[in-house]
Image (cartoon, rainbow, N blue to C red):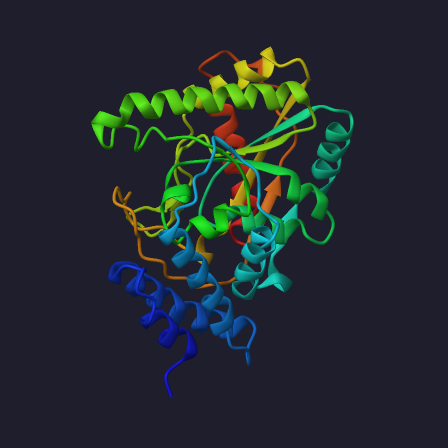
Amino acid sequence: MEDRFLEKLKNKKFIPPKYKKILEDFYFSYQSAASNISPNKNYSKIFETLIDIIEKQIKTPYTFSPYHKKIRKPFDYYSFGIEFLKPLVDIKNSKLLGSENLKEIEKKLLNNENVILFANHQVESDPQAISILLEKDFKDLASKIIYVAGERVIEDSLAIPFSMGCDLLCIYSKKYINNPPKLKREKQLHNKKTMKLMSSLLNEGSKIIYVAPSGGRDRKNKKNIIEIAPLDPRSIEMFHLMAKKASKKTNFYPLSLFTYNILPPPDKTQIEMGEKRITKGGKIHAYFGKEINLEKFEKFEKAKQVENLVKEGYKKIKDL
C-alpha cells in the first residue's frame, strides 16, 4: 500500500515536478532520521500539511513585506515550524549554554533596551532550532526574536511555510543582489526600506534581532570540517551605526549555533531556487556569549572581534 503522503503528493497538480522530487527525497530522509530519534511514529500527516501549504502559496503566492510579522491565526505557522523540526532534534543531548547572558538579555528588553545577536548561520531552520533550545526556560524570549532574512527563505516554495511563522526583516543578501542584474537597483531600494524599518524598530525599544553578518550558511571545507563563514565588516559596521543613531540603547551579543546536521546546505552556493533537502537529524547546540562593547574597537577591528567571539563560542559547543 502506497504511503498516504506520497499518494497525496502525486496528486498535487500545482506543485512542479522538481519540487515533488525534492519533497519526496526530504520525506524519506526525514522518516529515516526521525525514526532513530522518535521511533514508532508516522510523519505522513505533518508532511501532508506541509504540501497543502506549499500548494496554497503556489496557487496564491504570499507576499512578504519588508518587515513580516509571524502569522499565528487562523493557522499557527510559528508552532507548525517548531513541531515540524522537533522529531529531528535529539533534545536530550542538545545543549543551551550562556543562560546567564540570556537572563541579562531579558532584563535589558524589559528596560526598553534593544539587543542585536551577531550569529553564525548553519541551516534554513535555525529560527525553529533556536525556539526549540529556548523552549524550556526562555520560551517567551524565543517568540520575540526578529530575524534578518535573505530572499531565499521568502522566495523558495519549501522555505516559505516556515518563514511565514517568523518575524522577519527581509533583505537581499550581497550574494544574490546582482542576480539578475536588471533587478539590482530595485533590490537595493528594497534593502534601504528594510533598514529604515529596522531603525524605527530600534527607536521603539525592547527589540531583539538576530543577524548573520556572513550573509550565508556555514559549509564544510575540503577536509570535511564545518567552517564558520567569514563575517562581513560592512554589515557589522552598518548595524553598529544604526544602533548608535537609535533613541533607545542597543546592546550586542554573540551567538554561536551548531545545527548543521538538521538540514545541511548544498556544498556550494546555489543561485537557482529549489535546493535539495536531506536531513540527518541529531543534536543541536547554542551558546549565547557575553555582551560585546563595540565602542572599544576601531572600525575595521569590529568584525574580526565579533567573528572571533562567535568562533570561540562554536568551539565550546561543536563537540558536545
Does the rendering let one see residue 233?
A: no
Image spot of residue 158 (x, y percent): 39, 54
Image spot of residue 87 (x, y percent): 55, 66
The extreme left residue here reads: 181
Is 252 in front, or is 10? 10
Is 277 in front, or is 285? 277
In the image, what residue occupies the spot 52% across and 43% down? 314
Is 69 in front, or is 74? 74
- Number of callouts in the render? 0
In the image, what residue occupies the spot 37% across and 20% down? 189
Instruction: Tell me which corner region of the image, top left, top right, bottom left or bottom right, holds residue 316.
Output: top right
For the N terminus, give its image quadrant: bottom left
113 over 26 or under it: above or below? above
Does the rendering let one see residue 263?
A: yes
Is 149 in front, or is 308? 149
264 over 148 or under it: above or below? below
Image spot of residue 78 (x, y percent): 58, 51
The extreme bottom residue here reads: 1
In the image, what residue occupies the spot 41% across and 32% down? 214
Q: In the visual, does 296 lie left or right of 22?
A: right
For the C terminus, give its image quadrant: bottom right
Image spot of residue 252 (x, y percent): 61, 26
Q: In the visual, does 253 lie left or right of 188?
A: right
Q: In the visual, does 71 lie left or right of 206?
A: left
